[in-house]
Amino acid sequence: MLFRRKLYLIVFVISVLGLFVVQYQYLKIGLNLAKVQFNKNMVAVSSHIKNDLRTENELTFLIGKSITKDGSYFSLSLDSVQDASSHFLNDFLRDRLAAVGITSDFTYQLISRDSTYYLHSPKRFKKEDNIVVFPLELEGYLPKLIGESLFLELHFTDMNAFFLYQLNGLTIPSLIFMLAIILVVVWVLKSFYWQRKVITTTNEFINNLTHELKTPVFSIGLATKLLEQEDVATQKPVIKLIRAQVDRLKNHIDKVLDLASLEGGKHVFTLTTLDFYPNLKNICKEFEAITHLEDVHFEYDLKGEHYRIKAEASHLENAINNVLDNAKKYSDNSKILLNTTVRNKKLLICITDNGTGIAQKEQRLIFQKYYRVVDGNLHKVKGYGLGLSYVKNVVKNHRGKISLDSELGKGTSVVIELPLVSHG
């Protein structure tokens, strides 16, 4: 169990790390695609900006006066003209960039080929910022005005943050889904280990309780043996009944202990080759004696003389007794039939009753631990829903099969199928 727990934890951690690695790779691909798209958009917008600044218009006229330091046309000071030019050009560039989806912060400057500075944006980045520069060589009106090459440099900073922002539609949902997966898996594992702990605690309680019950059962059995020595004829039937019920109680206690051992993964079966015919006949005779005292009609028909199988006799006997006991408990004026057939190298033990039957929807649940068929909201027969779960486990460990066929109001038929061992 500890190994499996560690294995689950390792698989979970590797899976989560794998998801993060895959997400990181997708993020890198997304960033590269975003950069490619950004460069493509910059090429497109550069062409539009150069075309808009090629001819003389209101904006280029104002910029021309500013870079030539000619304030004669305006009533404002030259500093005001340059400030107005800076803001108008900044707004123009922002509109053009936004038109192609570029909303990142930017600055600009107009410079000549020999780095003579002419104009800059109202906002400027710090020198330590990681700046990406896109230079545009202007043509037409403005270069001719100053008589030399003129460049418009667009500066961008913190581009990775901008690209990540562009990918928010992909990254944020992915992170949310990954977090949801982690939370669900953690909750499932926590619930699983909590339930496992509850089951372990419950089994320990049942084991302790059943071990405590063994002492009074042993004492009652011993007292019964002492009473048998008195050999009073009138007491014999009563003593026989007490003895049979004590044996049944002991078998039930052993059954609960064995079921807990089975669920705990302990090996409690040692299969040996034997002839099960005498065992089965003895089961039928003992059950016939009990049913005679309880006014129950029981018949059995054992075909053949030898049933050579590999079995743990005590467990298999307990399982068959349990099915017979259920047939008796869940019917009024019971008529129970046990018959056997040998077919295709298999022993088929069929136990049929005329009881209340089981609804179709409940037949697939009847072999689950603690499950009991209910009538309305009341259990007609007291119990804990352990019997048929134990029977299924026993048959399974004998490499056999158990099936059930039932109809409400008409009774139930249970078939236990066990492989026969050929003589060798």
Image (cartoon, rainbow, N blue to C red):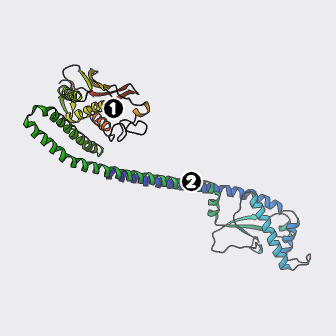
Looking at the image, do the residues carrying marks 1 and 2 touch, with CB atoms under 8 Å apart?
Answer: no
Task: Decide if residue 409 is in sight here.
Answer: yes
Name the amino acid type tagged 2: Ser
Q: Determine the image quadrant of residue 73.
A: bottom right
Q: Is residue 8 above or below residue 236?
A: below
Q: Amino acid at mark 1?
A: Tyr
Front-most of 411 and 67? 411
The answer to which quarter of the image holds residue 52 is bottom right
- Position of 417 with respect to 31 (left or right) is left
Q: Residue at x 43, y 30 (%)?
A: 360
Closer to us: mark 1 or mark 2? Answer: 1
**Residue at image point 26% right, 27% down:** 295
Tell me, yes or no, if residue 149 can be seen here: no
Which is more toward the observer, 422 or 193? 193
Q: Which residue is mark 2?
A: 174
Q: Residues within 10 Å of mark 2 (few under 14, many from 20)?
A: some
Q: Say which mark, if any, is on residue 141.
A: none
Q: Which mark is residue 330?
A: 1
Report how far apart the C-alphas of labels 1 and 2 lie in the structure: 57 Å
